[in-house]
Amino acid sequence: MKALIFAAGLGERMRPLTDTTPKPLLRVGGKPLIVWHLEKLAAIGIRDVVINTSWLAHQFSETLGDGRIWGLRLHFCYEGPTPLETGGGVWNALTLLEYNEMSTPFIAVNGDIWTDYDFARLPRDIADDAHLVLVDNPEHNPGGDFALQSDGHVASEGASRLTFAGIGVYRARLFDQWLDVIGENPDSTASPPRFKLAPLLRAAMQRGRVRGEHHRGRWTDVGTPERLAELDRQLGSANDQDS
């Protein structure tokens, strides 16, 4: 099983911090955000991790090296100066994820989140097209994203919507008919194409092909300097208590 970390965003809401540093490389709790993910992935036995890059891409290899320090093999997938969005990012990385008809599912994680979610809970195999981790709605996303049903299926709409945590397990067949879902436009017909993942997930939900789980622990979308500073303060306090 391999993993993909989304790290190609421009980090515009994090300016001026991201003027000189990509958002996933900003430090929190004493280490870059992305390193928290790398450590979790290594702990569950993942050995190959694809990292998609765009803004200040060279800093990722300079900071992380080849991944050997964590027992990983890192594969950097440069998207060009304009990020390909989440859907295009996965599509562009499928070769590095070694997709074929018999390929195993892969993990994908947003590089700009922090969580205490235990990656060991992620399923290693799924019969559906996707398995999503959902969390309670934060203040900046009060309406949520998707609804987790009592049987474990995830729907686009529902009475009790939760927020997508940016952690999921996917089968590459989710992308088999991606252009039919996205439709032709200047971005989707470019090479490589640029499109969001959410429409593909919603289409799979309509087919009953997405399941999920509710993580009730800690989770932060590190989308602003203020959230980064607060998370760093919380993690620093926790480390002080442990020492």
Image: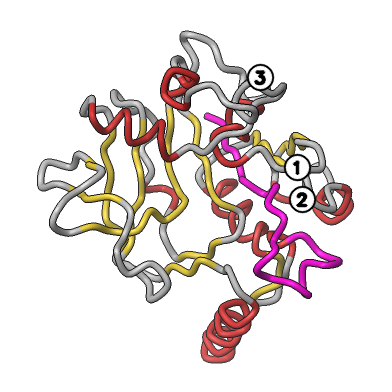
Q: Is residue 141 left or right of residue 8?
A: left
Q: Position of residue 163 (x, y in %)?
A: 34, 58
Marker count (numbered): 3
Q: Which residue is mark 1?
A: 82
Q: Residues within 10 Å of mark 2 (few under 14, many from 20)?
A: few
Give yes or no for residue 198 being in the magenta stretch: no
Q: Which residue is mark 3?
A: 95
Chain-order first, disc 3 or disc 1: 1
Query: Do the numbered discs 1 and 2 sit on residues whose CB atoms are within 8 Å?
Result: no
Q: Position of residue 37 (x, y in %)?
A: 59, 54
Q: Which residue is mark 2?
A: 69
Scheme of image coloration: secondary structure
Give yes or no for residue 19 being in the magenta stretch: yes
Q: Residues within 10 Å of mark 3 (few under 14, many from 20)?
A: few
Q: Nearer the viewer, mark 3 or mark 1?
A: 1
Chain-order first, disc 2 or disc 3: 2
* Amino acid type, mark 1: Thr
State which region is magenta.
Answer: 1-22
Q: Residues within 10 Å of mark 1 (few under 14, many from 20)?
A: few
Chain-order first, disc 1 or disc 2: 2
Q: Is label 3 in a helix, a strand or a loop? A: loop
Residue 131 occupies quadrant? top left
Q: Residue at x 61, y 18 (%)?
A: 98
* Amino acid type, mark 3: Thr
